[in-house]
Image: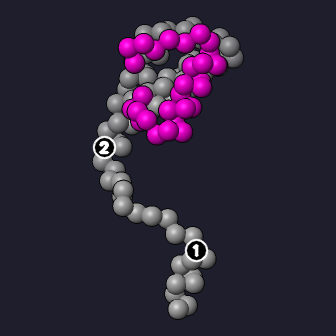
Amino acid sequence: MSNFTLASCTDFLESISSDLVLGREPQMLLYTSILLEMIWKSRNSVCFERKKLDIFHLHRDVLLQFKEFKEAFSRISVLTNSRWIPLSNRMAENQQ
């Protein structure tokens, strides 16, 4: 990410979505998703609840949620050798 430059919000979203589609850098995607959600919630609080924006509170909340998700995902085991077989194929195999 040393030469990571963005000209617009559209570039930013396209960059994130391309990483999501390609399955790259899952921790970056997790962090970015949490950041965007927290920015949106903060925006709603400022616009609709007349709250003041506290950037340090926002930053702390993003880091706490990121840590919580990382810890939760680290306890999940993923089956990498599994392969999805359509139900129709499984039923055909059982009939033989």
Q: Which residue is mark 2?
A: 74
User: Front-most of 92 and 65?
Assistant: 92
Q: Is residue 9 magenta?
A: yes
Nearer the observer: mark 1 or 2; the answer is 1
Taking the spot 35% from the left edge, 42% from the top edge, the residue there is 72
Residue 62 in the image: x percent, y percent?
43, 23
Taking the spot 55% from the left edge, 9% from the top edge, the residue there is 53
Q: CA distance from mark 1 to mark 2?
A: 31 Å
Amino acid on which the number 2 mark rests in the picture: Ser
User: Front-most of 39 and 8?
Assistant: 8
First in sequence, mark 1 or 2: give its number. 2
Q: Secondary structure at mark 2?
A: helix
Q: Is residue 92 left or right of residue 80?
A: right
Q: Secondary structure at mark 1?
A: helix
Q: Which residue is mark 1?
A: 87
Asked whether residue 16 appears in the rendered view, the answer is yes
Asked whether residue 41 appears in the rendered view, the answer is no
Residue 12 in the image: x percent, y percent?
57, 19
The stretch of residues the image draws in magenta is 1-28
Residue 86 in the image: x percent, y percent?
57, 70
Amino acid on which the number 1 mark rests in the picture: Leu
